[in-house]
Amino acid sequence: MKKRLLTGLQPSGDLHIGNYFGALKPFVDIYERHESFLMVADYHALTSKIEPTELRQNILNIVRSYVAIGVDPSKAVIFKQSDVQEHTELAWIFNCLVTVPFLMQGHAYKDKVAKGLEPNAGLFTYPMLMAADILLYDTDIVPVGQDQRQHIEYAREAAAKFNGAFGETFKEPQELILKSVGTVPGIDGEKMSKSYKNTIPLFGTKDEIAKAVMSIVTDSSGERPEHVYAIHTLYRGEDELAARYEEKKGNYKELKEMLIEDIDAYIAPMRERHDAITDEEVKRILKDGREKARTIASVKMVDVREKIGVSL
């Protein structure tokens, strides 16, 4: 039997190439080898301020994006987190099993505090909702980047806490650290992120790609523009690039133009598919996925409610 795999992505804005190489492409490369679940993490997106109209459109776009990059909806369960109420129910139960100091170790929470920002309660308890996302489906493996390993550790801790208190119920998942999942640099050299406003759009027009690439910060003291080169390695092999960058040494404008052409050539077929997928097609995909996900989650929660003593 195939192992069960689950991954998710927040519908928090337009996707960028960091999302693609960090999460989308690695999923496409492996999902057919597993019983795969692909979750649109819309409740997680609420930890940041987002307008309802924008959130609705983002949900549609993220499903459209997965299909455009090659995910076959008949070979993966694509569903929306908020369509399966068992996620939030189980998250509350996990919240009652773990301690405040334990949750205070969460990276997202600590990062906000370190920046002097006031995190909301949703961000504080975020790890337990993520644990519920994973554990509801008896997930075997979760593909993550190295910087997301803690999420899986939290899920294992939640499973162990519950199993210890109420008997064996949840499978402890394993992270799948893929070499292709890493930190994709933005146009400023920092991690590419919408919050940093340093992204290159995934399905952008050639002009939008060009505007972003031409804004990449270059370091004239080095042998080559390192930020440009780092992004370029996503599209061409390093041996080929090394020769080209040596040939164009010092000509940063030409190197950026070469990067623009390579990105656009790679993106163009996906962009065409993306633009052809209608909202109605997306809603049908989510409806099918909802029924499949709820069937599994509801059975698991019957067992959970019985064990914690709320079933009569």
Image (cartoon, rainbow, N blue to C red):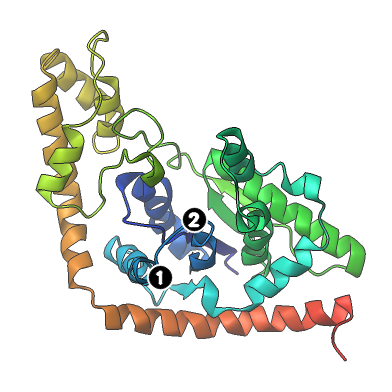
Local packing at callout 2 (Cα closer than 10 Å; few below 14, some 14-19, many 20+) is few
Residue at 73% from the left image edge and 79% from the top image edge:
301
Disc marking residue 48: 2
Residue at the top extreme of this rendering: 221
Q: Left or right? Give the position of 51 relative to 132.
A: left
What element does badge 2 sit on?
loop
The x, y position of residue 245, in whole percent, is 17, 19
Q: Quadrant of the C terminus?
A: bottom right
Instruction: Name the residue located 22 percent from the left edge and 65 percent from the top edge.
Output: 274
Residue at the spot 51% in from the left edge and 62% down from the top edge: 46
SS for callout 1: helix
Q: Is residue 35 above or below residue 112?
A: below
> What residue did someone put label 1 on?
52
Amino acid type for the residue under numbered disc 2: Ser
- Relative placement, left or right, of 45 versus 103 is left
Viewer can see residue 139 = no
Q: Quadrant of residue 283?
A: bottom left
Instruction: For label 1, count other residues whose C-alpha is less than 10 Å away and answer few (under 14), some (14-19) or many (20+).
Output: few
Q: Quadrant of residue 219?
A: top left
